């Protein structure tokens, strides 16, 4: 059980989730302009972001944390020094190589150092005459990027991992994916937001799992949660409902505390629990919507992208439940001591982490 507590407390300390870079590019009058919105401190610290969910897992996390508290005028020179060494790895071809140069850097003032700071790096390059397509290679170790074409009809939108290369992108537009392609492309985005990056959502789902080993209570809870977050995910992505993250994130942490604490006193599904879970699902849906807002949904393919993201989220949640069942439920769920020795201590650990996050998100 000590190992379970260690795992849960490690989750509490994981406040530095890795976010993808957002790259917007446009070509006009023979000039390519590329705007990279990125967690630049992680790059400057030298962290290999490929496959990493949290910067705390890196041996360079202390250097990263030190950079996060620097004001823009202090961080700027370090960013420019980093770009000078890193830029040759960012390869762009358009009927020949496109030599990029850094035009300017925009770094926000220091806010909450526990949250990623989104800085903008602006690059320009001359596109060779006669170029009709563009190919970009995202550097190894740079993590994921959402690459979006601007200023054309049916623009390209792609999700690349470190070291990946785009297909040839028509400079005049027309590379927008079809509905099924878009749906398929956004499934891994939704899944990735649960596993491995959605620690708060993972703990909430585990709180649902540890209420009872019976299948019926779990189905009722997951169904209520799924229906609710689907509604607010759609409303949030459409811009109909918008609540600041400063309100949503603490309430998500509070929802984790609630389900875990109720597990300690309820031996089965109460009549009101699915209703409460539905309410909390509305909050989690707004959290998911904030992720889609960062990525941006492709024009003309809003519905397929939204469905794909939601399918990915559901697959991630079901995977969490399956792992929990295979790890403890299948082996110990029928034991008379399961609730006292496993479910209740696990719920205490989950509640502790949720309370820590709530205090952190409200007061720090």
Image: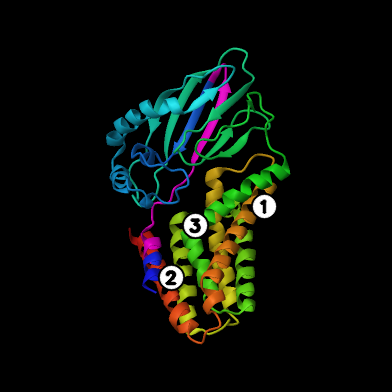
Labels 2 and 3: the sequence-earlier one: 3
Q: Quadrant of the N terminus?
A: bottom left
User: Which residue: 67% across, 43% down?
Assistant: 182
Labels 3 and 1: the sequence-earlier one: 3
Distance from label 2 to label 1 (Cα)? 30 Å
Left or right, residue 260 beside residue 182: left
Query: How many marks overall?
Result: 3
Q: Of all residues shown, which one is farthest toward the bottom?
A: 336
Asked if one can make out residue 360 in the rendered structure from this viewpoint, the answer is: yes
Q: Quadrant of residue 48?
A: top left
Residue ID for mark 2 = 350
Work out whether 37 lies above or below 246.
Answer: above
Is 17 magenta? The answer is yes
Q: Nearer the viewer, residue 334 or 212?
A: 334
Q: Identify the mark at residue 307; answer none if there is no mark.
A: 1
Residue 255 locus on image (x, y percent): 48, 69
Kind of element beneath mark 3: loop
Kind of element beneath mark 1: helix
Distance from label 2 to label 3 (Cα)? 14 Å
Left or right, residue 25 beside residue 311: left
Q: Nearer the viewer, residue 142 or 225?
A: 142
Left or right, residue 77 beside residue 295: left
């Amino acid at each position: 059980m000590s190992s379970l507590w260690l795992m849960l407390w490690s989750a509490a300390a994981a406040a530095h989730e890795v976010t993808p870079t957002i790259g917007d590019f446009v070509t006009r009058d023979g000039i390519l302009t590329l705007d990279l919105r990125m967690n630049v401190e992680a790059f400057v610290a030298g962290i290999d972001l490929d496959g990493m969910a949290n910067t705390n897992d890196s041996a360079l996390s202390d250097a990263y944390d030190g950079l996060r508290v620097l004001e823009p005028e202090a961080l700027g020179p370090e960013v420019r020094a980093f770009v000078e060494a890193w830029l040759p790895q960012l390869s762009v071809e358009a009927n020949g190589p496109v030599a990029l140069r850094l035009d300017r850097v925009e770094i926000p003032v220091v806010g909450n150092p526990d949250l990623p700071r989104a800085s903008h790096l602006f690059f320009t390059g001359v596109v060779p005459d006669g170029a009709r397509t563009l190919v970009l290679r995202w550097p190894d170790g740079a993590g994921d990027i959402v690459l979006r074409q601007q200023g054309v009809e049916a623009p390209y939108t792609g999700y690349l991992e470190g070291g990946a290369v785009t297909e040839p992108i028509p400079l005049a537009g027309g590379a927008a994916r079809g509905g099924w392609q878009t749906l398929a492309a956004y499934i891994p985005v939704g899944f990735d937001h649960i596993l491995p990056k959605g620690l708060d959502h993972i703990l909430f789902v585990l709180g649902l799992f540890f209420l009872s080993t019976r299948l019926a209570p779990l189905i009722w809870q997951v169904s209520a949660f799924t229906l609710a977050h689907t509604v607010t995910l759609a409303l949030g992505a459409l811009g109909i409902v918008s609540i600041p993250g400063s309100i949503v994130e603490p309430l998500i942490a509070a929802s984790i505390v609630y389900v875990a604490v109720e597990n300690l006193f309820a031996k089965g599904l109460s009549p009101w629990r699915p209703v409460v879970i539905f309410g909390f699902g509305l909050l989690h849906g707004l959290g998911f919507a904030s992720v889609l807002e960062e990525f941006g949904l492709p024009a003309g393919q809003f519905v397929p992208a939204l469905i794909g993201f939601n399918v990915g989220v559901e697959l991630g949640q079901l995977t969490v439940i399956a792992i929990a069942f295979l790890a403890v439920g299948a082996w110990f769920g029928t034991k008379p001591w399961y609730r006292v020795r496993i479910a209740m201590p696990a719920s205490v650990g989950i509640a502790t982490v949720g309370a820590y996050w709530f205090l952190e998100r409200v007061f720090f």
